[in-house]
Amino acid sequence: MYLVGAGPGDPRLITVRGVECLRLADVVVYDRLASPELLGYVPAAAERIFVGKGPRQHTMSQDEIDELLVERGLAGQIVVRLKGGDPFVFGRGGEEALALDAAGVPFEVVPGITSAIAGPSFAGIPVTHRQVAASFAVVTGHEDPTRDASGVRWAGLANGPETLIFLMGVENLEPIVANLLANGRPASQPAAAIRWATTPDQEVVAGTLGSIVERVRGADLRPPAVLVVGDVVGLRDGLDWRSRLPLAGLRVLVTRARQQASALSARLVELGAAPLEYPTIEIRPVDDPAPFDSALADVGQFGWIVFTSTNGVDAFWERLLRSGQDSRALAGVQICAIGPSTAGALATHGITADWIPPEFVTDSILDGFRKRDLGGVGILLARADIAPPVLADGLREQGALVSEVTAYQTTPSPESRDRLLAALELRTIHVVTLTSSS
Ligand code: SAH
């Protein structure tokens, strides 16, 4: 059993160990604040159990969750209990661990980045700062603060740590602020509330202890949010790095095939966007490789081979190696790559492209070959099943003997279809990217 902290919201903020555990899981038991995208790390056959928990909406009681974990643990399943933030920061992870211990189920705790610290960070607020705040406290805002039995000692809090961080505090904002003011915290002290921190929905409402209630209510800020009170909030102007990212707050749909999606996603992340990968097409080996194999049997006879995609390069080498040959079979053949990525894929096989056209399109290839004499020259094109005939036709017009073989197939991806429809129905996607006609 692994009690894993999912991090504050952005699925990239889970730990390496957390991902390792997800990859091992037979069962994942997750709640509302753990990013659903993390389920992408879980083996397809694993069971996914949502146990909910929002304010006033409990899908399963804590006892039922404890029971579920114990039952699965005793059955010998590899269970990941995935919890938002850190499992031991107001996550009832301690209770779950005690239940496991009582039942004799061994467990490991994988800490997570808590929203208590990451939430302020993503709003440009350091929870400590030299000469401003030497301590911080993380406090539950959930206890009814008007009750005598409240576990929160207001006088000590108001006059203790320079930075106060409240989780689960939106609904009780009024009494929290009133208690702090009544115990001597100045009304002029800066305060901020950060909702859905680290996600594209992040919203920040800032003010002072005197104005924060009105501002939060005015902005209709709902849970989940982190409330920060302290002079560190005043450092935001210089430190609000996130809102400076050009694509901050945008959810961008990446429809490329899985093989290439991650490269696009990585660059989107650099610009601050949240990429959502739903590959609409799949790149697959051809059903009938015989024509490809017969072209490869005599591959050294071609004058040129033209590669128009990294997929073509990968498929080519896959079949070449299977045929018992390797890159040396291309010793006397000239190689054209349509662009730098395709050339990069060739380089991984020890091949430096002889020629890359100045523009990475078919016309540019045809223009370039016009300067060479293609009369009677054999050219091999290893392409997708759906590749348009323009390139082969154009080369033939120039007198080349063109062999066009299907190196890979492009098919619709059934696996992501339903997930994609569900994502679109949520209407939270801002940008859709399409990088090929297919
Ligand atoms: N274990 C979690 C906290 C669970 S309590 C952690 O370490 O982060 C739930 C509260 O956490 C919410 O009411 C809210 O105050 C806070 N919270 C969790 N994720 C948040 C997020 N992405 N943005 C703002 N607040 C969040």
Image (tube, grey):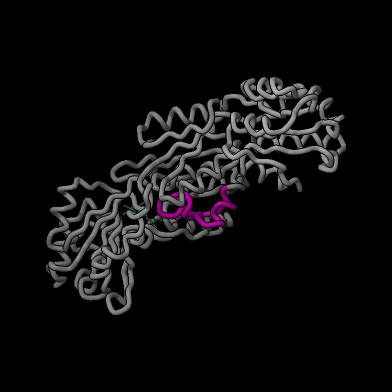
Q: Residue at x 19, y 55 (%)?
A: 173
Nearest to the observer: residue 372 or residue 416: 372
Furthest residue in direction bottom, as rendered: 131
Query: On screen, 213 above or below 295?
Result: below
Residue 9, position in %: x, y? 41, 50
Q: Can you say which quadrant of the picture contains the C terminus?
A: top right
Give the image quarter of residue 2: bottom right
The answer to whether one can see residue 352 in this image is yes
Q: Residue at x 49, y 54 (%)?
A: 14
- Please provide percent x and percent y for residue 72: 56, 45
Left or right placement of residue 175 versus residue 259 in this view: left
Please give the name of the residue rendered at 34% of the width and 55% of the height, measured from the top-left corner.
244
Q: Which residues are magenta?
A: 1-22
Question: Where is 276 relative to 97, above or below?
Answer: above
Count of numbered badges drawn on the protein: 0
Q: Judge left or right: residue 318 versus residue 149.
A: right
Residue at horizontal 33 percent and vertical 67 percent from the top: 126
* The magenta stretch spans residue 19: yes
